[in-house]
Image: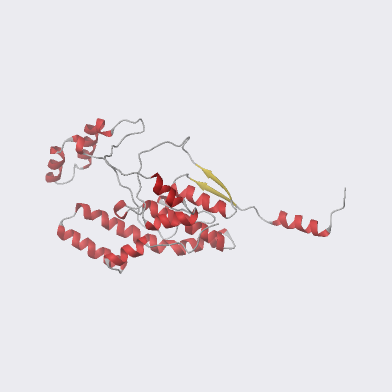
Amino acid sequence: MAQQTNTQKNEQQENCNQPTKKVVIIGAGLGGLAVAIALRKLGYEVQVYEKARDFRPVGGGLGLLPNGLNSLDAIEPGIVETIKQSACEVGTTFLKNTQGETLSQNADEAKSRLLEQLTDWGESLRSLVEAMPAEQIMENPIYDRLPVPSWSHGRVTLLGDAAHAMAPALAQGSNTTFEDAYELASCFSQASSIQQALAYYEKRRIFRIQLIQNCSALGEKRYYATKQEQEEINRQMQEQSSMSREEFQNWLQNYKPSYQLN
């Protein structure tokens, strides 16, 4: 066997000393899969863990707005056109459970649960619900959380709903998740360590997300407010953002990644 040259030995030693870039992602949701694709493009070895045994329809829906689409296109160029070609016009909607049963079959149960939740509410609202036909009631719980000052600990961080679940008033749950995925991968590409990447990530994301969370929570209240209360909510949203309504919408939806991930 030919003797190895010093150059070959040095190259092997350098390769042995280089740490393998490994990332573990818990949850194969929108954000988990998006950031997995983004990090693999950067050369990371990515493992995704998901508790569901298989992928199947869950009846979930999401709205894609410019900021989310811009993020997806930066992660996977061309995917937005694919999404558009796969889309269809929605005419009639049906809510079904995982067994494929239309939820209106259990409408009486949904109405009973709603009335139970309204036990301590005003009589006028309960009377309105009691008078409404059960099949016209759609049960759709909303979950959000208060903004938190940090998403990371050591070499672990959060993104999407795990970091910033929000009310759907601004349709930003999935869109900010795709922003997270892009920004997290971008930070990994620019930092010299995982801790530095996560510090960059929080610095870029938390202020924007806290503002969107707060305005989403306020916006959700508008659906149940009187005209006078809506005006007060609009004032609070402008106060939160320090922007007019039009300026806020532009700031929200015109988010564009600085470059595509390759």
As rendered, which of 64 and 7 lies closer to the eye? Answer: 64
Residue at 55% in and 59% down: 188
- Could you say where residue 113 lies in the image, as x and y percent from the top left? 24, 37
**In this orientation, which residue lies closer to the viewer: 164 or 178?**
178
Residue occupying image coordinates x 30% and y 59%: 215
Residue 28, image x and y in percent?
47, 44
Quadrant where the C terminus is found in the figure: bottom right
Tell me: 254 left or right of 21.
left
Image position, residue 21 (x, y; %): 61, 53
Against 227, residue 51 (above or below) is above
**Residue 101 location, quadrant:** top left
Query: In terms of image quadrants, where is residue 213?
Result: bottom left
As displayed, is residue 127 above or below residue 152? above
Residue pictured at 27% horizontal, 58% vertical: 218
Q: Position of residue 254 (x, y in %)?
A: 37, 62
Task: State left or right for residue 119 relative to residue 3.
Answer: left
Residue found at x 26% / y 54%: 220
Residues 80 and 142: in front is 80
Q: Is residue 229 left or right of residue 66?
A: left
